[in-house]
Image (tube, rainbow, N blue to C red):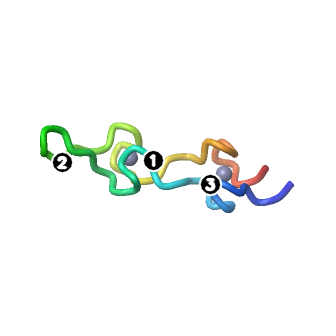
Amino acid sequence: MGSCKTCWGRKTIDCPVCRGSGKTYVDGKPKPCHNCDGDRKVPCPACRGTGTE
Ligand SMILES: [Zn+2]
Ligand SMILES: [Zn+2]
């Protein structure tokens, strides 16, 4: 059991949809990212948010 190598124990990763910006652009207009709800981070999929593996 060690730190997750995907998030390095941070439990979250930059949202891959908005690439950590919290926004997506629809027809040139910024919208809160639907994947992270504008939080910019999502729970790490590799460790499911536990930070360990
Ligand atoms: Zn996002
Ligand atoms: Zn992780």
Residue 2 percent across, percent down from the top left: 82, 59
| Left or right for 25, reference 19 | left
Is the C-beta separation of discs 1 and 2 under 8 Å? no
Q: Position of residue 1 (x, y in %)?
A: 86, 54
Q: Is mark 1 within 8 Å of ligand 1?
A: yes
1 vs 3, front mark: 1
Q: Which residue is mark 2?
A: 30
Closer to the camera: disc 2 or disc 3? Answer: 2
User: In what element is the residue under mark 3?
Assistant: loop
For the point 40% across and 39% down, the residue is 35
Lower sequence index among marks 2 and 3: 3
Q: Quadrant of residue 7?
A: bottom right
Identity, as a three-letter code, of the amino acid under mark 2: Pro
C-alpha separation, residue under disc 1 versus residue under disc 2: 16 Å
From the viewer's perspective, is the residue at label 1 or at label 2 nearer? Answer: 1
* Mark 3 within 8 Å of ligand 2, using the beta carbon: yes
Residue 16 tag number: 1
Give the number of marks. Answer: 3
Residue under label 3, please give it.
11
Circle 1 SS class: loop
- Residue at image location 40% in from the left, 53% down from the top: 19
Query: Going from the N terminus, do you reach mark 1 or mark 2 first?
Result: 1
